[in-house]
Image (cartoon, grey):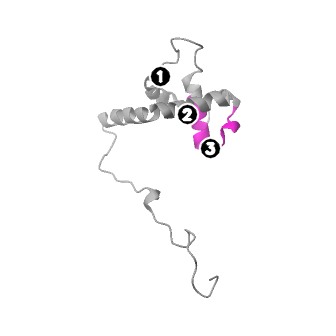
Amino acid sequence: MTRYELTDRQWQRLEPLLPPERPPTGRPNHHHRTILNGILWVLRTGAPWRDLPERYGPVGTVSSRFYRWCQSGLWQHILSALQIQADARGEIDWDLHFVDATIVRAHQHAAGARRTGAIGG
């Protein structure tokens, strides 16, 4: 396992939540774990898809799987299932509240407001 890749424990939790690797018709898919590691590499590094290391498979395969899973709602399904499992184990405290940076207003000058005053105005 290298940096940004799933541990065996993480993979064991995710594998049952993914679609079947062997479709009923056509060619078999690339291994989900390899593809998922490639997706995580791009998301965690912030690199463009074209910089994806070859060990994760073809860029087109990895990116198309990511976008197909976005459109199908798979990521939301995985999140919900993992939350249900963690809640059943008592690992989630639903009373905690988090502040998201999207609600923090920027100062008016950060938003491009016109300056008034002697300096720079």
| x and y, in percent, of residue 118 in the image | 61, 88
Q: Give the secondary structure at mark 1.
A: loop
Q: Secondary structure at mark 2?
A: helix
For residue 19, the mark is 1
How far across and how far down the image is residue 86, in percent?
35, 36
* Amino acid bearing label 2: Tyr
Residue 23 versus residue 76 in the image, above or below: above
Q: Nearer the viewer, residue 6 or 20?
A: 20
| Disc 3 element | helix
Residue at 53% in and 15% down: 22
Residue type highlighted by circle 1: Pro
Residue type at numbered disc 3: Thr
Instruction: Report if residue 4 is visible in the image.
Output: no
The residue at 58%/12% (across/down) is: 26
- Label 1 – label 3 distance at C-alpha: 26 Å
Q: Earlier in the sequence, mark 2 or mark 3?
A: 3
The numbered disc on residue 68 is: none
Which residue in the protein does label 2 denote? 67
* Labelled pair 2, 1 in contact (Cβ < 8 Å): no
Q: Residue furthest bottom?
A: 118
Q: Closer to the observer: label 2 or label 3?
A: 2
**Where does the magenta region start and end?**
36-53
Which of these two is toward me, 85 or 116? 116
Disc nearer the start of the sequence (1/3): 1
Which quadrant would the N terminus be assigned to in this image? top right
Nearer the N terminus, badge 2 or badge 1?
1
| Mark 2 → mark 1, Cα distance in angstroms | 14 Å
Which quadrant of the figure has residue 85? top left
Q: At 58% from the left edge and 34% from the top edge, which residue is drawn?
A: 39
Q: Position of residue 50 (x, y in %)?
A: 70, 37
Q: Which residue is mark 3?
A: 45
- Residue 50 lies within the magenta run: yes
